[in-house]
Image: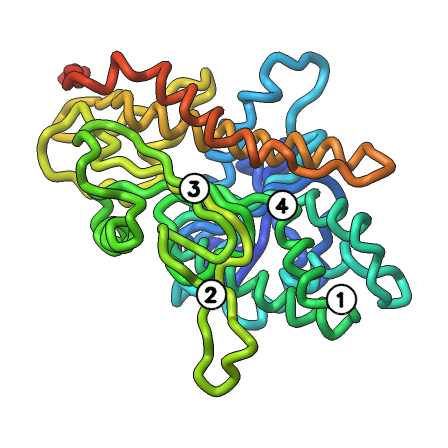
Amino acid sequence: MNPNYPHLGVEVGKRSLNAPHHWELLDLDNLKFVKPTVLCLSGNYATTNRDANAFAKQVENYLDLMFAPKQGYHKLDHVDIVGVKYSQYGDLSQSAINKIANAILLLLIDKNGYPLDINTAKKNMSLITFFTFCAGNKALQSIINNLNEKLLLFGYTENEAYAINNATLEVAYAPLNVLYNRIPSVRVISKKDEVVGELNFALLKKGGAFTGEQDNDGIHLHRDKLGSLNGLNRVIQPTILPNLPFNTATAESIQITTNRLLNTYDGQYDEHYIAITARDQDWKINPTKIKNALHYAPNADCVSQMMAWALCKGVENSLQNFKAKNYVPNTYWHEMVDDFQSIINSYAHKTTTMPQAMEIEK
């Protein structure tokens, strides 16, 4: 592609050791998911392939948690990490939404266009794990809603469509959509996020999921059951058809909340940036540079580890189902809150004080 004439529309690529900058463009019109895949949907500023590649690279480093000790192969031999470059307007067009939903649909119907048995469909759906940031979370809901419409057209029932949705996982940082939750999701929310923090915390407080009594520097967990999101009921009773309630939260969610991720810094800093939770090649938290100081914040490190843990559990289930003859349910979901709490507890002594940042040598 000529760099002087960048592509203005939506493009899809994947991490590849054999491609320049480890980024291989894919054909969106003929997109297929052929092995365990993490589909990365970034914020709407990801309008270049460099942006999409960097976002996917963060996932690649997260997966070192489960692949680093292995010898003789690279993680990309077993997992595709696919990312999306948005259009010049910063959106995922309806056409692109439809094409991505079609690629997922291919996993769920046979060669004659008939629905698979439900366990085979769930097995195939589990091959995809989603990693989203801000508007990417909203884009995912649009993709899944589009997919579900197709599933109904191809002969699945509504309950079967939701069961298929529940066979996968989303890890979301700064989720933009506060109404829909179609995929079991782990949602990371900082109160100091100047884009979505105030809205999410207002909803969490209204729903009783965040009381305001939690300590300023801590990290807290809330789990939503089916039909609720941020502690609020999302089963809507229409006035025209009162016997047909509409549920916008057909999957459970876990909210990871904190008043601030950068608890090494007492000033004002917008924590909307997902790079705060990125990890390096040695699986250490990437520092955040503020006023000539590098901040290795314990809260950011802790949340980063929880995000990586959740992502790896989803990918682990993908790998299990890719090799298995019969569907392996994602039972890890019921253990996730306890796993997260153990990670938080391991940082308890670090989050009660204000550690000093590392000054940058001038």
- Residue at image position (63%, 36%) is 16
Residue under the point 36% across and 35% down: 221
Q: Which mark is on residue 235?
A: 2
Local secondary structure at mark 2: strand
Across and down, in percent, residue 261 comes to 26, 32
First of labels 3, 1 by sequence position: 1
Q: Nearer the viewer, mark 4 or mark 3?
A: 3
Residue at the (55%, 27%) spot, across then down: 63
Give the residue number, with chain letter if any, for mark 4.
168
Q: Does 335 sit left or right of 350 as displayed?
A: right
Residue nearest the viewer, comparing 169 with 195: 169
Mark 2 to mark 1: distance in Å?
22 Å
Residue 226 sits above or below residue 36 on the image: below
Q: CA distance from mark 3 to mark 2?
A: 17 Å
Residue 156 circle label: 1
Residue 223 rendering spot, x and y as whole percentages: 43, 41
Disc 3: which residue: 223
Q: For the residues labelled 3 and 2, say whether their Cβ atoms are less than 8 Å apart.
A: no
Q: Which mark is residue 102?
A: none
**Between discs 2 and 1, the one toward the N terminus:** 1
| Three-letter code, disc 4 | Thr
Q: Amino acid at mark 2?
A: Val
Mark 3 vs mark 1: in front: 3
Visible in this render: residue 247? yes
Label 3, label 1: how far apart the Cα atoms are: 29 Å
The percent position of residue 284, horizontal first and vertical second, equals 39, 18
- Amino acid found under the numbered disc labelled 3: Arg
| Front: mark 2 or 1 | 2
